[in-house]
């Protein structure tokens, strides 16, 4: 059986490797200089074009395998107890080390190749003095691949030295960002509606890496005769099914964005989209058949191996078509756009009146997807608890749902739509994500809920309960929750962002705007988690410390608002001048932003103080009830010890004269008063 597995996997792997290399390289060769001249760019030569395509292909498949190996080592291991906390030697670790090294090398090569290819110059030009430095900054692509090179290098180094489960968490985060950075500055950055296309593209990038990555590792396991046990197969099918659903939903959005209203067969990109849809259909059929056979108990080793082989071929085909798509300018490159559409992806012709802000919605896919996932997981956990017979406070559920509803409203309503062209509206969104939404989210107690809903694995592979527990005990998390660092980050978010060129530069890109929103939400969550959070933080503060923490932050918001209101310098003036909105009044907008920062910062913090006071009172009440209960049960010796201490002090201080009767009476009176 092992030989059959190896033979099947070997044949399919060779065919997949042929498809992986042939499709993108053939696309590049056949296209010639047409893609370059279409975007008014010089042709760097076929050698540069082919070399860049080859490097893209290698980086694509190796980065996918890297993410798959990390996910497998973290969540798809048949280990229990102490063994599950260690990183074992095996095919998964070998795939991680090799693929991350290959990814790092190919990303480094793309820094040089993209400097030539993206600018349409031959490699020989890079030898001229100062040429590389100029070409590196003349396009976004070399810089993006430089960041990917660093992040892939972090993954590669960590894979060599990480020995514990938690040691793979940072490499996983680095790998995800390493995938997203080149995608953010590619075809998703250009054209009308690129805000929607970009958000959907980010989801596709992550889902595809997880989906096809774990399949590549599973195929490698099958080639060595190490098929997954049923417990891991159930978890495996869950991961690939969820990621496949994300692909099926998000990829058509990306395709519609790139086609930009043209017929699906009217361009090369359209035909490539058809090929990618075909890959997804085959992949979906394989996964559905695999899940069906697993649930009906009709899954044999040969069927499992064949499924892994076909799915692995789909992985190679996906990467091949994905690289081929990136080599041909899509129709969205050639649609007429306004300045607003260049920067934001959409127009905002109407002034941001209240009716406009509440009715002109534009869905922010990234935050809508995050909110949907967060609420779904939360409700599943609540249902799990209730089926078990355990109670969960309804108020916490309402708080969690309300928090994410606030996030969706702030980013998808007219407020989110106008947060880029109007600084005053931007400040409302900032305050909402930074101060209002986190206030509700931390009261949801999601970590406590997940720990209660999940149970420690007594037999078989460990699960969510152990994963969460390990993360909570992880030393870097203690650093992240350091009260001083959180406080500094919370305050610097205002002064460092808006009083430096960072804000003006970030507002030019949708990905940077989204990054700011994510930062606002995260730093606000950390701040409130330390003050009023239901979940116990790694570094809990006493109640008096929490009160001082909040009071210390209040003046900084007031000072920030006053500076904005009194400043004659317009924040990000160049960006707003480029937009040139007919309804814009930059000075008035900044004055309004200052007032919003002032009042919007003080009001939520006052609410926090009230919540903190209520929590403090409830804790004192619970402590008093606990003490009374222990006294009634005779399990608290605190008062007896206190009475004995008073008696000993009296014995040392009372003169020898008093009679024993008087002494006993005094002692009884004292003990009676203390007991009362």
Image (spheres, rainbow, N blue to C red):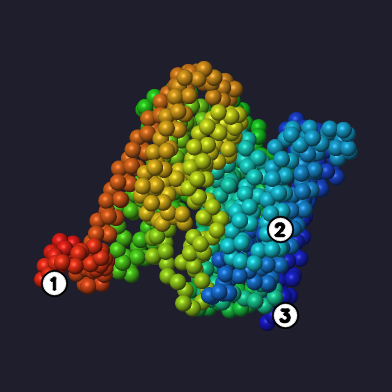
Which corner quadrant holds the C terminus? Answer: bottom left
In the visual, does 342 lie left or right of 422? right
37 to the left or right of 300: right
For image coordinates 67% across by 78% down, the residue present is: 225
Residue located beneath label 2 in the image: 156
Q: Is residue 561 visible?
A: yes
Mark 2 and mark 3 lie on one chain; the one further toward the N terminus is: 3
Calculate the distance from the C-alpha at mark 2 to the C-alpha at mark 3. Answer: 32 Å
The residue most toward the front is 657
Q: Which mark is residue 409?
A: none
Residue 262 showing in the rendered view: no
Classify mark 1: residues with Cα within 10 Å, few (<14), some (14-19) or many (20+): few
| Mark 1, residue position | 660
Circle 1 or circle 2, nearest the eye: 1
Q: In the rendering, at what x and y percent does residue 625 appear?
A: 23, 61
Cα–Cα span, label 1 and label 2: 83 Å
User: Which circle marks residue 3 in the picture?
Assistant: 3
Task: Note whether 301 is above or below 244 in the view shown.
Answer: below
- How many labels were placed on the picture? 3
Residue nearest the observer in this picture, 587 or 228: 587
* x and y, in percent, of residue 271 in the image: 66, 47
Give me the residue at 42% from left, 23% from top.
592
Label 3, label 1: how many angstroms apart (C-alpha)?
A: 97 Å
Quarter occupied by residue 68: bottom right
Query: Going from the N terminus, do you reach mark 3 or mark 1 first?
Result: 3
């Amino acid at each position: 059986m092992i030989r059959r597995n190896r033979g099947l996997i070997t044949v399919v792997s060779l065919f997949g490797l042929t498809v992986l290399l042939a499709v993108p390289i053939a696309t590049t060769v056949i296209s010639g200089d047409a893609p370059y001249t279409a975007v008014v760019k010089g042709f760097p030569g076929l050698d540069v074009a082919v070399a860049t395509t080859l490097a893209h292909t290698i980086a694509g498949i190796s980065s996918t395998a890297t993410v798959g190996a990390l996910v497998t080592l973290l969540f798809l291991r048949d280990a229990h107890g102490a063994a599950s906390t260690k990183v074992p030697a095996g095919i998964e670790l070998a795939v991680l080390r090799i693929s991350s090294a290959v990814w790092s090398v190919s990303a480094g090569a793309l820094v040089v190749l993209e400097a030539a290819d993206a600018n349409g110059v031959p490699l020989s030009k890079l030898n001229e003095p100062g040429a590389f430095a100029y070409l590196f900054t003349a396009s976004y692509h070399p810089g993006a691949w430089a960041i990917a090179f660093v992040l892939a290098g972090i993954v590669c180094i960590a894979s060599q030295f990480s020995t514990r489960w938690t040691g793979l968490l940072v490499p996983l985060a680095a790998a995800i960002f390493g995938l997203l950075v080149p995608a953010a500055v590619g075809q998703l950055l250009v054209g009308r509606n690129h805000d929607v296309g970009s958000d959907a593209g980010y989801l596709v990038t992550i889902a595809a890496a997880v989906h096809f990555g774990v399949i590549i590792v599973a195929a490698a396991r099958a080639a060595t005769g190490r098929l997954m046990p049923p417990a891991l197969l159930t978890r495996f099918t869950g991961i690939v099914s969820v990621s496949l659903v994300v692909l099926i939903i998000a990829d058509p959005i990306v395709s519609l964005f790139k086609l930009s209203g043209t017929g699906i067969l009217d361009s090369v990109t359209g035909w490539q989209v058809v090929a990618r849809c075909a890959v997804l259909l085959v992949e979906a059929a394989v996964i559905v058949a695999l899940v069906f056979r697993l649930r009906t108990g009709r899954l044999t080793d040969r069927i499992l191996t064949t499924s892994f082989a076909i799915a692995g071929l789909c992985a190679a085909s996906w990467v091949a078509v994905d690289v081929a798509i990136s080599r041909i300018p899509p129709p969205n490159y050639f649609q007429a756009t306004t300045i607003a559409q260049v920067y934001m992806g959409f127009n905002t012709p109407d002034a941001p009146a209240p009716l406009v802000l509440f009715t002109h919605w534009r869905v922010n896919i990234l935050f809508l997807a995050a909110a949907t996932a967060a609420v779904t997981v939360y409700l599943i956990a609540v249902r799990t608890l209730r089926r078990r017979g355990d109670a969960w406070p309804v108020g916490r559920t309402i708080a969690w749902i309300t928090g994410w509803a606030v996030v969706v409203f702030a980013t998808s309503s007219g407020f989110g739509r106008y947060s880029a062209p109007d600084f005053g509206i931007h400040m409302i969104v900032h305050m909402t994500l930074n101060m209002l939404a986190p206030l509700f989210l931390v009261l949801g107690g999601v970590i406590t809920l997940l720990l209660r809903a999940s149970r420690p694995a007594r037999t078989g592979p460990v699960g969510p309960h152990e994963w969460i527990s390990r993360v909570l005990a992880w030393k870097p998390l203690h650093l992240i929750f350091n009260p001083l660092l959180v406080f500094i980050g919370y305050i610097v978010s205002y002064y460092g962002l808006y009083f430096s060129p960072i804000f003006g530069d970030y507002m030019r890109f949708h990905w940077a705007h989204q990054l700011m929103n994510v930062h606002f939400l995260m730093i606000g969550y950390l701040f409130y988690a330390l003050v009023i959070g239901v979940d116990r933080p790694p570094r809990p503060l006493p109640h008096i410390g929490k009160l001082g923490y909040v009071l210390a932050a209040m003046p900084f918001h007031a000072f920030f608002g006053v500076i904005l209101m009194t400043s004659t310098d317009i924040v990000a003036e160049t960006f707003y001048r480029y937009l040139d909105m007919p309804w814009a009044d930059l000075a008035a907008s900044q004055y309004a932003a200052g007032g919003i920062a002032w009042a919007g910062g003080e009001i939520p913090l006052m609410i926090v103080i009230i919540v903190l006071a209520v929590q403090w009172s409830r804790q004192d009440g619970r402590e008093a009830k606990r003490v009374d209960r222990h006294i009634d049960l005779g399990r608290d010796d605190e008062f007896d010890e206190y009475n004995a201490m008073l008696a000993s002090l009296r014995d040392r201080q009372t003169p020898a004269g008093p009679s024993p009767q008087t002494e006993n009476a005094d002692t009884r009176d004292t003990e009676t008063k203390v007991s009362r």
